[in-house]
Image (cartoon, rainbow, N blue to C red):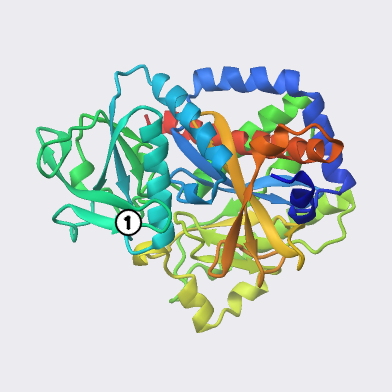
Amino acid sequence: MNTNNTISKIASISSSSLKNLQNHLLSQRDLIEPWFDAQWHHSPAPFYASVDLRNADFKLAPVDTNLFPAGFNNLDSNAVLAAKKATQIAIEQLNANIKNILLIPENHTRNQFYLENLATIYNIIKTAGYNIHIGSLNPDISTTQDFQTTNHGKILIEPLVKHERQLQTINHDFTPDMLLLNNDLSTEVPNLLENIQQYITPPLESGWAKRLKSDHFSIYAQVAQEFADLIEIDPWLINPLFKNCGEINFMKKEGYECLADNVNALLNDIRQKYAEYKVEHPPFVIIKADAGSYGMGVMTVHDGEEIMKLNRKQRTRMSSTKGGKSISRVILQEGVYTFETWGEHNSVAEPVIYMIGSSVIGGFYRVHTKRGINENLNAPGMHFKPLAFHDSASKCNQDSDIISNSFYVYGVIARLALLAAAREFLIHN
C-alpha cells in the first residue's frame, strides 16, 4: 500500500485539540494497556463488535456500539488476517471445547453486501481452524440453499431444527458447540433459540428486542469516568452526553412535551461545555430509537421547538425501525460533529472500528457525499473506505506515524465502548 496515497485520501486529523488528546493518550499507553487487561479479566469482551466514532476535533466519542456487526466485508485484507488470530484467542478464552460453530444470520439474504459480510465471517472462522455452518432462522428457508456472492462465490445457508434443547441443521448432520449470532433480534427472540443448552454469543439479551442504547451509554459514562480519572482528562472529551424520557408516539404526537424539554435541557448542558472549551459551533442533538439499528429512526435537532413542528413525513420516519418495529422510546444524544473528510471532494466521513474479543482488528470510514457534518451518515448513499491499520502501523516515516497514532486512539475509544458492552453482559447474566 502507498502510504502517501493513503494520506492524500484519509480523513483530516490536524486539529490541535485532538492532537493534544491523541498525544496524551499515546503518552499514557503504559497505564492504558494494563488497565484494559485488568478490565477484560473482570468483564470478558463480547465475541465481536463494531463501534461508530465521531471526531469533532475538540472531542472524540463513540455514538453507537453494534454487537452484531455486519460490515466485515468492508475491512481490508490485513484486518481479515488479524481477525483469524483474534478469533482463535477469543474462542480459547471461553475455556470450552469449541470446534463446531453455527453462524446465524439476518433474514435479508437478498442483500448482496450482507451476503459478503456473512462470507467474510465464515472464511475468518474457517481459516482460524473451526468447523462452521450458516443456519437461518428465516421460516421462508425450508431447504438448504446456495446464495451467490460477488467476491466469495457461493455460500450455503441451511434451515435449523431444535432437538433435545440443541440447535442442529435440518438433516441433524451438524450439531454446533457455539451459536454465533449475526442477527440482532430486532423484534423478538425466536422460539427456536429459547432454552438452548449450547453456548450462544452474543447473549440473547443483547438483541434489540431487549437491549436499550440508553442502558449502554449509562454504563459507557461510568467507563469513561473511570478511564478519565486514570489518565486525568475531562470525560466529556470522550463521552457524548445524553438524556431520555418516557414513552413517545410520534404518529399520535404523544410525549412531545417531555421530548422537547429534554432536548432543550441537553442543549443547555452542551452549551456549557462548548463555552468551557471555546467551541464556536452551534450545539445539536441526535434523537434516535433507543432500540434499533441500520440507521433508522434518527433525526438531528437544534431546538426543542423543532419537535413540536414535525410534519407527517418526519413523524412517519421516526415511528418505526428495522422490521417495522414501532419506536416507543428514544435516546437524546449529544450531537458530535464529524470534521473528518475523505477524497478529493472532502466527503463527510466517520471511522467505524471492528473488534474480535478484546483485539482491534481494523475498521473503515463510512463516507457520505450528500450528508453534512452534523447528520447521521448511516443512511442510503453511504460508501466505505477501509482503514489500513496494520499496513500503516508497519511503516516508519513520520506521516505514517501520524496515521497509526490516530488509529491507536480510535482503538482506545472503541475499546472503552466495548468494555461498556462487556459490563452489560455481566448485568444480564
In the image, what residue type sits under mark 1?
A: Thr
Is residue 85 left or right of 326 when viewed as pictured? right
Q: Quadrant of the N terminus?
A: top right
Q: Nearer the viewer, residue 183 or 229?
A: 183
* Residue 420 seen in the figure: no
Q: Which residue is mark 1?
A: 187
Q: Where residue 105 sits in the image (x, y, percent)?
A: 32, 49
Image quadrant where residue 420 sits: top right
Q: Residue at x 57, y 45 (%)?
A: 76
Is residue 189 left or right of 232 when viewed as pictured? left
Q: Residue at x 51, y 48 (%)?
A: 213
Is residue 73 left or right of 221 when viewed as pictured? left
Q: Nearer the viewer, residue 246 or 344?
A: 344
Q: Where residue 2 sits in the image (x, y, percent)?
A: 73, 46
Q: Where residue 241 sits in the image (x, y, percent)?
A: 67, 48
Q: Residue at x 74, y 52 (%)?
A: 10
Q: Where residue 47 sits in the image (x, y, percent)?
A: 43, 33
Q: Nearer the viewer, residue 363 or 237?
A: 363
Helix, strand or loop status at disc 1: loop
Q: Quadrant of the C terminus?
A: top left
* Residue 299 seen in the figure: yes
The answer to whether residue 64 is above or below residue 347 is above
Q: Characterize the local packing of mark 1: few (<14), some (14-19) or many (20 or more) Cα atoms within 10 angstroms.
A: some
Residue at the farthest bottom position: 312
The answer to whether residue 228 is above or below residue 153 is above
